[in-house]
Image (tube, helix red, strand yellow):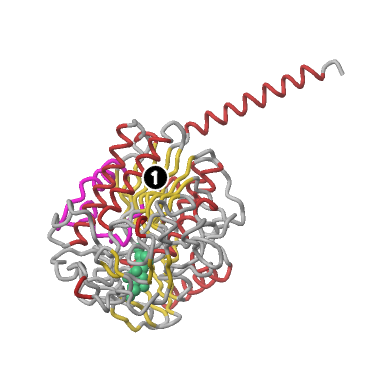
Amino acid sequence: MNCTRPVTLFAVVLVALLASLSDLAEAKNPNVIVIMADDLGFGDVSCYGATSLRTPHIDRLAAEGLRFTSGYCSASTCTPTRYSLLTGTYAFRGKRTGIAPPTAPAIIQPGTETIASILQRAGYATGVVGKWHLGLGGPSGPDWNGELKPGPLEIGFDTCFLLPTTNDRVPQVYVHDHRVPNLDPADPLWVGRKKPSPDHPTGLTHRDTLKMDWSHGHNSTIHNGISRIGFYTGGHAARFRDEDLADKWVEKSNAFIEQHKDQPFFLFFSSHDIHVPRMPHERFQGQTSLGFRGDAIIELDWCVGELMKTLDRLKLAENTLVVFCSDNGPVLDDGYQDGALEKIGRHRAAGPYRGGKYSVFEGGTRTPFITRWTGRIKPGVSDALVCTIDLAASCAALVGKPLPGNACLDSFDVLSALLGEEDAAGRDHLVQQDNGSSGTYALRAGSWKLHRYDKKMARNVTVEQELTNTKMTKFALFNLSDDPGEKKNVIDDHPDVAARLTAQLRKIIDDGRSRH
Ligand code: NG6
Ligand code: CA
């Protein structure tokens, strides 16, 4: 009995010591900022070969970090890539993971492990600023005038400041945590699929009033001289101007960084540039010869510069891992007549790759991908195969937290490749998909690339021939080492390779997971 007290004291001291040691370890964990561009192609920035415009800030990130030549997003549309970035699971495994409509309920269910919840548990302050497009609210959809939950706060983010859908869809209001700020209760916000009244002005009935005309779809409710997908009324005091989005994202992100400068933080900076409607701030309009699409790239580059300036000012750059990536490849005409197609000149938005947004050709998912951590990453170029879906497992490894077995089912720990450590090869294979669970897949394994079209049609985007439907055979095989442009289907010459990759792809789909 006599020795109880010293033992208790010893235990208390030991626990306190261990706790402070782990605090110390956590305090040393680097901040993580993921900057995700929207619809930015492999060839759209100068450090990836663009010569029609200059992107000095993104170039600086690349010069001070690692520029990946095989960096991918997991899908060639927005919602599935973002779903996979957060959950570390291929979107084709989930329900309703295709492009989300304005009234979509939350797609990622509360309790799902995400990159944000992993880092939150490791003591990080976690925030998302910018485009969400992963649905909000319960099964009946967003309660725009009430509490917008579940949403990011229910899956690991401490705070959010969002564009709820994507800006060619209604409504044009922000969401701060669980609410639309500045809503006047006397002017409630209504969002729906049907025209609210016969006299409601739309892009069809009031086309001559538009400041940017539509080319396909996008002809419903008009706001700020631009007609959108979907209908809404009310909420006037809460509405924003398209031209001010980038400034708002930078303002909110800088405030978040400033607020959390003394503890590890995770910021998902989810830019809306360069998605349609491309309506950059007036100070960027006309800055390039490529029209608003090029000007939006300059605006995106400016945002990157502002974030880096903040890291420099707060002396955080040396302890911050910055990942720059895109959510899918490029598209020129995505529904508005903004001159992108006519002014393209010699610019090749997908670089040397075929296809773009909506396609499983390389142009759809092989995108700019840069990591920078000035205290840790040796600058250079990496050919390692990495994907946005890997950031969850890699960040878990970064902070030394094991991943639960039933979470992040397709996220691989490629941290050593992201940090440019010697001989780090990244993945040996990656599944690409177009949208939701459409049944269009590709599998890259080494330099082989198998395409599988369950529906035998693929949307293909080329500069000359926009958004055509290309008839595909069920399977096609390309060898990226001598045919990066995927021009020559060699499936008949390599039946053994095709059989191996077909079986591998089927197994990945059927197994329900690829992380073991
Ligand atoms: C498509 C829209 C396109 C864009 C896309 C989503 C039409 C004809 N096309 O359905 O304009 O909104 O969805 O883009 O309506 S994403 O980058 O958010 O996935
Ligand atoms: Ca996108």
On the rendering, which quadrant does ligand 1 occupy? Answer: bottom left
Name the image quarter holding residue 326.
bottom left
| Place of residue 223 in the rendered image (x, y in percent of width and height, measured from the top left) | 29, 65
Q: Nearer the viewer, residue 254 or 57?
A: 254
Please state, as top left, top right, bottom left or bottom right, where the N terminus lies in the image: top right
At a point 39% along the width and 55% down the height, the residue shown is 174
**Residue 149 magenta-drawn?**
no
Q: Nearer the viewer, residue 200 or 112?
A: 200
Identify the residue position indicated by label 1 in the image: 33
**Residue 40 magenta-drawn?**
yes
At a point 42% along the width and 42% down the height, the residue shown is 32
| Place of residue 71 in the rendered image (x, y in percent of width and height, measured from the top left) | 36, 56
For the record, the magenta segment spans 36-65
| Place of residue 429 in the rendered image (x, y in percent of width and height, measured from the top left) | 45, 62
At a point 40% along the width and 40% down the height, the residue shown is 256
Please state, as top left, top right, bottom left or bottom right, where the C terminus lies in the image: bottom right
SS state under label 1: strand
- Up the image or down, 319 lies above or below 48; here it is above
| Place of residue 138 in the rendered image (x, y in percent of width and height, measured from the top left) | 55, 63
Q: Nearer the viewer, residue 105 or 184?
A: 184
Name the image quarter holding residue 185.
bottom left
